[in-house]
Image: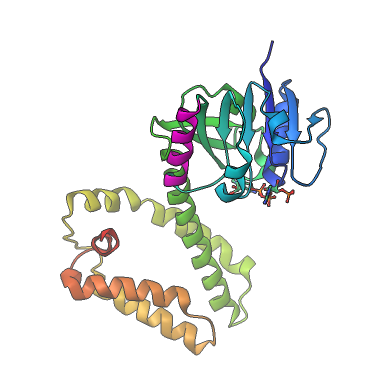
């Protein structure tokens, strides 16, 4: 027979997780601060009632919200609440001290993708992951419980930078009446092209040799100044271009003007 599973937190993501577990044929109990029901799942009144299940899945907004709820005996905790690597490691230690099996996971998907192979679930700690199979495609990223959170934030950081850059670009184009639907296809192929430069850039950050005959930092610092000025001229916010300009310029003044863009990592690392 299948394990019994509880879900704590029935927000946008938690509800999708609970539905996927029901769909997979698990016997599911659910708890939410604001009473809520999930078809074919049993609603329980307290987290402690939910802890009777073989596996407890948590999906709350933050660790601050989650931590006070975890009082009582839990057999296996699958933590899908987003946090920092340190928060995940502290929870892993708490689990170890309390005899709780611990899996730390992050969901690289939106609720609508849960239960499909498009939903990648990165997880670390305990390799025992079969409950995660109900949610999508589990990928084990290491024994250290903090690693899933590390990957999560690294990938999201990349996403937020790209989305921020896209919105700035849309505003810049829009300031001259050019519509997103005209500009976006170009943006998409540009991103695809740019992404092919990442492996070499990554390599350079490891060897720390930044000789380039492609494009020197100097010219990119000038470009970022132009970008800042253009946004200013069009009456737009310049927070993002200014931040990049400041960072790149610091690398330039620390002797990397003639080096590749990858040399900026020297400023980020310290
Ligand atoms: P929601 O805001 O939709 O849900 C938040 C959940 O946390 C609700 O169940 C809410 O209960 C509960 N909660 C908030 N504060 C408290 C509190 N003080 N005490 C008890 N429960 C509380 O968020 P999501 O479902 O979107 O996100 C949940 C987690 O999943 C987050 O860590 C998020 O980063 C992660 N995630 C979400 C993704 C998404 O696309 N939505 C993608 C990947 C990860 P109540 O209903 O009572 O308010």
Q: In the current view of this chain or complex, which residue is farthest to the top?
A: 1
| Viewer-nearest residue: 92 or 245 | 92
| Viewer-nearest residue: 186 or 266 | 266
Q: Position of residue 205 (x, y in %)?
A: 24, 53
The region drawn magenta spans 86-98
| Viewer-nearest residue: 186 or 246 | 246
Image position of 17 (left or right of 125): right
Q: Position of residue 103 (x, y in %)?
A: 51, 30
Image position of 159 (left or right of 68): left
Residue visible at 56% across and 47% down?
Answer: 63
Q: Position of residue 7 (x, y in %)?
A: 69, 33
The quarter of the picture where the C terminus appears is bottom left
Residue visible at 54% across and 83% down?
Answer: 236
Most prominent secondary structure in the magenta stretch? Answer: helix
The type of colouring in the image is rainbow
Image quadrant of residue 20?
top right
In the rendered view, tell whether residue 218 sits above or below residue 74: below
Q: Position of residue 240 (x, y in %)?
A: 45, 73
Q: How many marks?
A: 0
Image quadrant of residue 60?
top right
Residue visible at 30% across and 75% down?
Answer: 221
Image position of 240 (left or right of 5): left
In the rendered view, tell whether residue 60 sits above or below residue 46: below
| Viewer-nearest residue: 156 or 232 | 156
Q: Is residue 24 magenta?
A: no
Residue visible at 80% across and 28% down?
Answer: 42
The quarter of the picture where the N terminus appears is top right
């Amino acid at each position: 027979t299948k394990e019994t599973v509880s879900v704590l937190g029935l927000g946008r993501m938690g509800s999708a997780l609970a539905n996927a577990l029901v769909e997979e044929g698990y016997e599911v109990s659910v708890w939410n601060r604001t009473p809520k029901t999930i078809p074919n799942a049993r609603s329980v009144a307290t987290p402690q009632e939910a802890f009777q299940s073989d596996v407890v899945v948590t999906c709350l907004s933050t660790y601050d919200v989650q931590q006070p709820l975890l009082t009582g005996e839990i057999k296996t905790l699958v933590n899908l609440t987003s946090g920092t690597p340190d928060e995940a490691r502290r929870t892993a230690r708490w689990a170890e001290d309390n005899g709780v099996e611990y899996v730390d996971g992050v969901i690289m998907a939106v609720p609508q993708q849960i239960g499909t192979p498009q939903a990648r679930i990165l997880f670390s700690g305990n390799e025992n992951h079969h409950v995660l199979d109900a949610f999508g495609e589990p990928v084990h990223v290491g024994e250290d419980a903090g690693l899933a959170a590390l990957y999560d934030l690294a990938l999201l950081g990349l996403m937020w930078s790209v989305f921020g850059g896209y919105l700035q670009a849309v505003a810049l184009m829009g300031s001259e009446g050019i519509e997103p639907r005209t500009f976006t296809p170009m943006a998409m192929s540009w991103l695809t092209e740019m992404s092919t430069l990442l492996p070499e850039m990554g390599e350079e950050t490891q060897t720390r040799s930044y000789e380039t005959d492609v494009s020197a930092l100097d010219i990119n610092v000038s470009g970022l100044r132009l970008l800042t000025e253009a946004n200013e001229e069009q009456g737009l916010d310049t927070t993002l271009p200014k931040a990049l300009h400041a960072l790149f310029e610091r690398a330039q003044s620390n002797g990397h003007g003639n080096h590749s863009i990858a040399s900026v990592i020297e400023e980020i690392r310290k």
